[in-house]
Amino acid sequence: MNDTFESVTSLRTRLDVLVAEHQDIDEAISRLDDHPSADELLVRRLKKRKLFVKDRISLIERMMSPDVLA
């Protein structure tokens, strides 16, 4: 049972870190979008990273959710 608790706690910690990173990236993109001279390559890379982080968040949320039978 300890392994399960530690696993869920570890997932929760990782989820919290990813959510914070996702928010930070979103804010950075917003700031860059406000400036017409923004580096387009940097914006594209940030958007790609944001999508990757969002996918990881979704994966962890699915792992933490109990299976629901249809």
Image (spheres, rainbow, N blue to C red):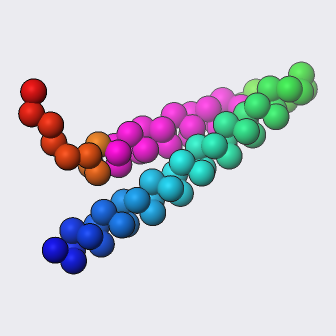
- Residue 39 seen in this snapshot: no
Q: Give the residue at x 36% y 60%.
A: 11
* Magenta stretch contains residue 57: yes
The quarter of the rendered structure image containing the C terminus is: top left
- Residue that extends furthest to the bottom in the rendered view of this protein: 2
Residue occupying the far left of the picture? 69
Q: Nearer the viewer, residue 39 or 2?
A: 2
User: Residue 7: x and y, percent?
Assistant: 28, 67
Residue at 68% in and 46% down: 24
Among the 4 quarters of the image, the one containing residue 26: top right
Q: Is 24 left, or right, of 6 in this rendering? A: right
The residue at 54%/48% (across/down) is 19
Above or below, comparing residue 19 to residue 68 in the picture: below
- The chief SS type of the magenta part is helix
Q: Residue 50: percent from the left, percent from the top? A: 57, 37
Q: Is residue 12 visible?
A: yes
The spot of residue 45 in percent (x, y) is 64, 36
Quarter of the figure that contains the N terminus: bottom left
Q: Is residue 36 highlighted in magenta?
A: no
- Report the span colored magenta: 43-61
Residue 21 image point, x, y percent: 60, 50
Q: Residue at x 63, y 43 (%)?
A: 23
Label total for image? 0
Residue 68 is left or right of residue 59, and the answer is left
Q: Residue furthest toward the top?
A: 36
Instruction: Answer above or below: position of 15 versus 13.
Output: above
